[in-house]
Amino acid sequence: MQSGINFGSKVFAKRFHYDGDDLGARLTENGTVFKLWAPTAEGVVLRLYPSGHTGEAVRTVSMQREEKGVWSWQTDENLDGVYYDYEVTVGRDSHCTADPYARACGMNGWRSMVVDLPKTNPKDWEHDRAPERQAEDIIYEVHVREFSWAESGGFPEKVRGKYKAFCETDTTLFDRGEQPTGLAYLRDLGVTHVQLMPVYDYGSVNEARPDDSFNWGYDPVNYNVPEGSYSSDPTKGEVRIRELKELVQSLHQQGFRVIMDVVYNHTYSRDSWLERTAPGYYYRTWQDGTPCNGSGCGNDLASERSMCAKYILESVLYWAEEYHMDGFRFDLMGLLDAALMERIRAELDARYGRGEKLVFGEPWAAGETACKRGIHLANQKYLRKMDLEIGAFADKVRDTIKGSVMDAAKVGFVNGARGQEHKIIQSVTAWCEKGFRAPAQSITYVSSHDDMTLWDKLVYTLDPKCQYDVFTPEVLRANRLAAAIYMTCQGRLFLLSGEEFGRTKQGAHNTYNAPIALNRLDWERAWDNHTLVDYYRGLIALRKQLPALCDKGEDAWQRMLHAEVLTSRCVSITLDNTGGTWETIKVIYNASSHAVPLGGMGWELLADGRSSFLWQTPQPIHQPAVQPVSVLILGKRGE
């Protein structure tokens, strides 16, 4: 922090908070305007370049200081395609910096670019619309490069690992024209939302040589610019913009909504464009001045400060408007202040309709962070006080089903744990009595990009030989049961890409920078393990027909009519399914090693541990029994 300046004070905010929406480089009818918020700067020099990654500046201009800490310069020239950066002087220090408000950049993001955004729009972009919402939201998490890298996906070689791969409509295994892969496969699976792991410009992959390394991308550099390593030409700032828009347009046309994974809790390094333009302002520190590290990445953004909050809010709205994103998943949302999350939710609702854009995140942090008294963070503790349309990952559901993600050996309901029965019952109603206010807040899941894949966790805890590449019957049964449990819990469903075919990373916990060969989606495995895929497909299709599970209202948890622990590791749930084909639904989860007989008449068999498609031709079940490590889903029609 600069000596004598209290960046978190109301006095500083009153003096320097800027309400305008024109920061960055903007083209107007009269030319080009550059504006930068640098409240403590004593001088700012704008430097213009013909290239985004080579050569010297061809022009330098001293900017003028205006009110509220804004520096500006304008010209009657149209500078579309011109690259630029700033030299910002604070005290005795001068720093070269790109524009934190930039909407385009050169290779690796070190220089910003003036861009005429309408010229980057694909054909018919003005008519692009998200498909209608289905009865349930099925969110499928993918990484752009992982999705299409493997040869087995059948994608043309030139688009593998690129935005362009999502514009391929009918790929097949090894391009043989038979088994679907890619988006055709996801349509068949029943996915409604494709969640893209970070696609903003991040710092851990060299865009000049993207094949030399791999990263998930949770290290932002330019928040409002697409990542260049996924584009066909990272040297041209407009190309990555157009190709990401083409990706969104293609997904919309093929029936999917698009969720963007965003990371506003930290930057790639503390030495960011935000820090270089306003040193000390954007980051939290402890009282002794040391940086906070609640993110585990060396820095925490001070989202509660007015211009930082404005920056994050405007960034989210920009992605929603300019790129037609349909939702946002917030990384380490527990580090962001709740007031900001409420503002984001309210602004999206005002522009697009109540709940139309999904908003959810991780309601936790990697460690402690510093906030002044009165600031509430958007974490699990505060969740019940937040808007019902701000969702959070239901880690209690995840850990109850398969065991803690913090300890590979610790088991859950499906792989050996005892005493989990009542937690399973609470999971069915999305923990609405002890955590969430309504199922709308719950992102119900058992696996994501973090930690072991579901398959690897089950192999590690159930197969003494740890055969990750063998479809062991015991592991397959546990996987089916795990899927059946969380897919019959209330909330919004979320799954890691490939979970449905037993995706393996050979037991690795954290593959954020592991080789692409380990991280890639193995489309051949999807067909080798197609019976598991079909089981997921049937569960998803059945769920969309069950209002008892799709209901997101505050009273939805009251649809549970009865819950009973039948035996150790066997639970029966009865749900009010008013509004559906079956008036009542009964689900029995049996993780024990023996069959459990059931009483009652008048039930139709909708799914069991072998088939999730029995609902297509439901048959009366007269002497029901649930088999070991299995499930029964039953329906009863009204009189």
Image (cartoon, rainbow, N blue to C red):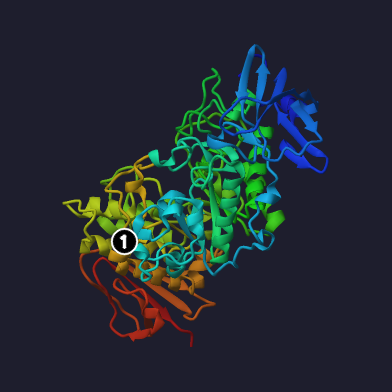
For this rendering, which residue is in front, 336 or 434?
336
Left or right placement of residue 118 versus residue 168 in this view: right
For this rendering, which residue is in front, 224 or 450?
224
Asked if residue 18 is positioned above or below residue 461 in the image, the reply reads: above
Asked if residue 534 is positioned above or below residue 503 in the image, the reply reads: below
Q: Residue furthest bottom?
A: 639
Q: Is residue 175 visible?
A: yes
Q: Quadrant of the N terminus?
A: top right
Residue 155 position within the rendered picture, expressed as x and y whole percent measured from the top left: 42, 59
Residue 28 position within the rendered picture, expressed as x and y whole percent measured from the top left: 79, 42
Question: Callout 1: few (<14), some (14-19), or many (20+) C-alpha neighbours within 10 Å?
Answer: some
Left or right placement of residue 160 versus residue 277 in this view: left
Q: Is residue 554 visible?
A: no
Asked if residue 239 is positioned above or below residue 98 in the image, the reply reads: below
- In terms of image quadrants, where is residue 253? bottom right
Residue indicated by mark 1? 524
For this rendering, which residue is in front, 412 or 217?
217
> Which residue lies at the image location 64% right of the left edge and 11% below the top edge?
92
SS for dot 1: helix
Left or right placement of residue 487 versus residue 258 in this view: left
Amino acid marked by disc 1: Glu
> Which residue lies at the image location 42% right of the left edge and 66% below the top edge?
185
